Each structure stands twice: as structure tokens, then as C-alpha cells.
Amino acid sequence: MADNILLNELVKCISVESLVKLTLAKPRLPDGDIRNVFVKPVLLNAGLHWSFVYRYPTKDVTKNYLPNQAIAEIEKLMNEMFYNADLMTVEQTFYFQQFGNGKSTWSSVATPKREAVTRHNKEKASFIDPMGNIYLQELGVVSKDGVVKKDMYHKFRQINRYIELITPLLKEIETDELKIVDMGSGKGYLTFALYDYLENHQHKKVNMIGVEMREDLVSKSNSLATKCGYGGLRFEAGSIQASYATDSDVLIALHACDVATDLAIAAGIKSNSKLIVCSPCCHKQLRKQLNPVGITAEITSYGIHEERLAEMLTDTIRALYLQAYGYETKLMEFVSTEHTPKNLLLTAICKKKFSKPDAKVLDKIDALKSQFGVSEHALDKLLL
């Protein structure tokens, strides 16, 4: 049977994350297929695991287990396939030997301190800590022990990418209290994460409103905000309206469908929001108008190109309108196209306050519309 001392030391390795490497050797059956098994900790997208490399004569097979599952696998391997185990931790090396008569021996030596892979190795890469995170647990992103669920890693990655992109822009806003309006907050993944990061990691005073049409989501989000102790975060039932943006420093509209993005941009401009952040979705309004001039018409002879052209043109005109009103704009990738083709983030930071739009930029918008046969962009009526 596997030596209890070995299993106890492995349990300690879990509690303090001290495993460096484990080698299982000396097969019980000399002609067996597996020669050795090497185990080491590894940080995967789903959290800290122990990686097993099963060494065969002609190939290696790698499998990854959660630490508790790994110990069960090690116990099975030591009971059925191997006699010896060498365990390296951050401060010691243990040598375990089993014999055919059921007896076993073990010894240990102190070693210079070594570095182990731990969850904390990833802190620099993650803006939001999944450990003990109430809202991520309640929203189903992480388990109770702080491990990101396999089918939710894309959402966790999106959350961290969002924080990574937006926080440098917020540094340009000088105010004692950040007033943020998130229009179309949905279940609140990104709303909670941004509030958490600003309030608890950057220690800023934040007054944040999540606006959502579905009253059931509003109720759940307010209850969760209370449970998290987020006194500066509240949710209200409503649609995208300029009234919510009044006096806001930051206006956010993520995946607002079709012209809802334009309503949010117009609300931000009219309310003099210092930062406007949008992730456009469903570019329907311009697509049905497309009638390119000359050889450009060949682009729309293919349906998928027509769709992409409508998206590019719609968002380019949105960026130009923001520029016309004194905003410095950027378009960047928000999340990988592996998870959604709607992956752009449009950011606009106010650099100048114009009482009326820049005529030169409006001329560019008119030229684009003329080139592609577009009679009207939603922002034409909303802003002019």
C-alpha cells in the first residue's frame, strides 16, 4: 500500500502549495508499459493543477488533475505500478521506497529553498482575484474554492481584459469621486468587476449605476451588490437614455444592439461624459442601406463581406462623430474571436469641449456615406 507518510506530505503540499516535483519510479512489473511518472504543479486557465507525465517506451502522455484528484491518482499508481517515489518540495526532498513484502522506508534531506508554482504566480496577469470573490461565485464564474470553471474561463478572461483596457483611460480623469453609468449592464459581470477593481484595488471613491431593462436582473444585481458590501454600486430598471448619463464622468455601453450603441454615444456626448466606452453589436441599420459606388460594389457581392463592411463603416462613422466633438478615439480587440465575432471595443476620451462639431470631420463622414451609398447613420439625427 502507498506509504501514509507520502500521502500526508502531498496533502501538506496542497495546503501550502509547496510541491516542486514528484517522480514515481521502479515499476512493480519490469515489463510494464509505463517506465516513470513525473508530477509537477502547473497553472492552467482553470486554475492550479498537478500535471502528470506518463513516460512510455515510445511516447509521453500528459494529464492534468486538480490537486485532491492528483493525490488519489498517486495513491493508485503507488499501490499498483511503482515502488519508489522522490518528492521535492520548496525546502526538502523526500525519498520513499516500498518492497514486495509490504514493508517501506523513507528519508528526507533539507535543501536550499526552491520556488514552486502557486496561484499567486498569476496575480500580475489577473486584475480580478477569483479567490473568495463573492460576485464571481454568485454569477457562476468560479467555484467556492476560487477555481475558474472550465466553461467560464472565456468570461473570466474577458473580465480581466476589460479591466486592463479601461483602467489606463480612467487615470486621465481627475475627480474625487468617479461617476460611472453602465447602460445595458445585463447580469453585471463587467459592472461588478470594474467597481471591485476601482474601489478595492485602486481605492477610488466610485458612484456607479448599472442600467438594465430586465427588472429581474436589476433585483438580483442589487441584492448581490448588498451582499458584497458595495455601497457605491446600484442598479436601476430602464433603457438607454440621456437622463442617466447626466453629470457622469464615464458612460459605458457594452454589446448594446444596433442603434442602442448610437443612443449611448449621443447620451455621452450631450452629457459631456469624459470617457465613453462601447462594445458595438448587431450593425443592422447601415447594412440595408449599402449601395457602394463603382468598383467598391464588388465588396458587397459576397454576403459575409457585406456584413463586415457594414460593421466597419458603422463603427468608423461612430469614431469620427466622437472625434468631431473633441474625443480621442480608439478601436481595439476586446475578446478573442474564438468566443464572439463582435469583439471590438470603442473608447473615447474627451480632449476638447466643442460647442459644435468639427466641420472637417463631418465632411469625412459625408464622404464615406457618399462612397458607400449610405443615406443616414443613426447619429445624424441624434447629434445634428
Image (spheres, grey):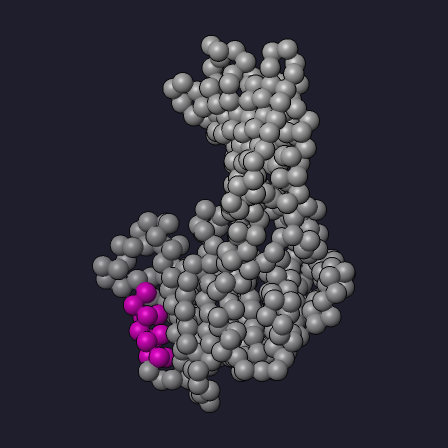
Residue 221: image x %, image y %?
71, 60
Residue 300: image x %, image y %?
32, 54
Q: Which residue is drawn at 55% across and 56% down?
A: 123
**Residue 327 falls within the magenta-colored stretch:** no
Residue 38: image x %, image y %?
49, 29
Query: Depth check: 249 or 58 in front?
Result: 58
Looking at the image, is 94 positioned above or below residue 128?
Answer: above
Q: Residue at x 70, y 46 (%)?
A: 144
Magenta stretch, main secondary structure class: helix
**Residue 369 falls within the magenta-colored stretch:** yes
The magenta-colored residue range is 361-372
Quarter holding the N terminus?
Answer: top right
Residue 32: image x %, image y %?
49, 12
Q: Residue at x 60, y 18 (%)?
A: 98
Residue 195 visible in image: no
Q: Residue at x 60, y 36 (%)?
A: 66
Residue 103 visible in image: yes
Among all residues in the image, which is located at the extreme bottom? 355
